[in-house]
Amino acid sequence: MARLLSNPSAPSISSSRGNNTNNTNSKFMSMQYILSHLLFGCCCTYLGLILGMNFHTSSCPSSSIRECPCLGNTYHGGSESGTRRQQQQQGAASNYVESSLGGGTSSISSSSSSRKFPRSLDNMFVDYATVPREDFNRHLEIGVPFDKTIQGAEDVLVLYTNQKSLPSNSHNSSLFNLHSEQAFENCHSVKVILQEPSKKRRSQQCIAIVPQWESYYVHKFMRLPRQKLSSGVDYENPLRYVSRSHADDGKFASVPMLSIHTQAYYKVLMDYLSNLDRVVHDLQRILRVQKKKSRGPDQSNAFIVMVCNLGQSELLHNFVCNAKAKGIDLSRVIVFATDEATLNLCKGLGINAYYDKEIFGEIPENAAKGYGDKIFVKMMMAKVFCVHLVLSCGYDVLFQDVDVVMFKNPLAFFASDKVAEWDMMFQDDGARSMRYQPYSPNTGFYYVRNSPVTMYFFGVLLRMGDLVASTKSHQAALTALLNEFASWKGLRIKTWRMGDENPFPGGVEYHRHKDYMRAFVDGKMHPYIFHMSWTENKENKKLFLEQLGEWYLREDTGACSWPLDCCLATPNITCHYKDKPSKIPCKSSPNIDKRGKSFWA
């Protein structure tokens, strides 16, 4: 090889020293080739490992399109974004190899490649995980009526604020799709945010988490006109601070007016408070005696509380006849009558009643014409008064409207250990509008466990009569207060979700859940009660209860000498509308809704 590499015109060198030198040079150059190829091979192998690991950790299930954690891009199989993602990963790996070989200035360390958030958030978040939504609710139930899980909103996002809060094996396994127990095993506290899934066309919403001394309230900005009373979202408007009650279209409920709502309620509240001690003293004696006579569950400290005027007394009459026909004990029921005629009816029906003219005397005897009229509003405050009175006597309260019918006494259920953690429990109203969020409580059937917190709760609600008047419902005022007390005082609130196997169904099932009602009339559901809510007036309530087979009251044509004489042993089943649930087929009856479909079709 020495001869081949030498100049052919030069003299030949054949000494042994020259040969040894050439052989040494040849071996050295061969070793350089071997080492360079070995280094190149190692680099290629390392490059392959990097690419393989990136593709493995960033790949998503083929059955659905999901957000992948790496590089912040979305993986869409073979889509353009997926190709762009691969190019970025290849570029990052190439930069690493170039840097390792000294051919580049960029490097990717192991710490930066595992970083989930920028360094500017190091004191806020270190990592995140996901937990299946249903599993989360079983482990950490808030008490809201948990709606069914929909596609694209199946998981709960968990943010970790420091390394110690991470799951114990977080360095060796994925943090996606964890069980709740594992995800929160090292968390000293968990703060939960309820966020409605994207409405897509209707709302373009952003969420900001700001490093700051913390607030337990959500602050809200919307693109609305600068005039405070104006509504209508317009993207040309700047973001301005608004209330949590602002709807997506910018509409919101105003505050009570001093001259119209607040001052008018002052007199009502003064009359109530000035008579409170006297009424509580009288009522305690009545309830104490009645509890001793009661045949209700021994472990229960509750009374079933109702309020009624003469206009709604027919529904009360049916409630009593219905329960007696089924053999249900009513010894724990007390009715707050708002007039003497209703008081006398209760005496004739053999149930406990209380009437105080100083508190209830100004409530009209006639029935409300519809939801929200003046008579309706006054009755709403009477409902607050009677719950506050019984709580003041030291008892738990199961409040229910007179349009409720029972299948079995629910007091034993509320006294059981399985619901002992809840301070207040509600039937699901079914409404999901802004003013009922997030608990959607139906205030026509709910349970209150007597405690200092619930006593304080109703003391505050008692002073919010002007809000009840302005919103024309104590439901909105009570819901707003539930949110406040849950966060502020740790009040435990539970709403039983509508449909499925709801033990306390009502109007939302009757009008919106045909499958549930078919199972109900077929005897496959075994609820405690049924509440004919979501119905405009008492006339329609009666018609719906008649065809549902829950009307046990004979028409009073003067033949009933005593209220109990009007009670039926079996229900008066009568068809009225074919598009509403009925115990028997009502196919020949008309529709009540314009586009109603036959329930028995």
Image (cartoon, rainbow, N blue to C red):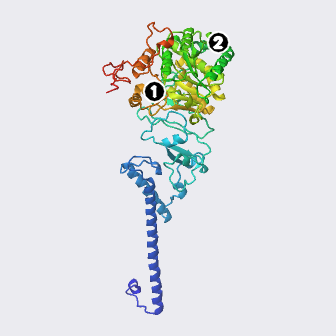
Q: Is residue 580 left or right of residue 106?
A: left
Tell me residue 546's x, y (percent): 41, 19
Q: Amino acid at mark 1?
A: Asp
The local crowd at label 1, few if under 14, some if 14 to 19, many if 20 or more residues have their Cα within 10 Å, is some
Q: Which mark is residue 331?
A: none
Judged from this view, the residue extending furthest toward the top is 558
Q: Which residue is mark 2?
A: 271
N-terminal of the pair, mark 1 or mark 2, is 1
Residue in the picture at 45% in, 24% down: 507
Which quarter of the rendered picture does the N terminus lie within? bottom left
Left or right for 366, reference 484: left
Name the amino acid, label 2.
Answer: Asp
* Residue 56: quadrant of the picture: bottom left
Q: Residues within 10 Å of mark 2 (few under 14, many from 20)?
A: some
Which disc number belongs to residue 249?
1
For the C terminus, the image quarter is: top left
Whole-percent x and y of residue 579?
A: 35, 23
Residue 86 visible somewhere in the drawing: yes
Q: Secondary structure at mark 2?
A: helix
Examine the rendering and report whether any part of residue 246 can be seen: no
Question: Which mark is nearer the camera, 1 or 2?
Answer: 2
Residue 45 spot, x, y in % from top left: 44, 66
Q: Nearer the viewer, residue 192 or 280?
A: 280
Residue at position x 53%, y 9% from top? 365
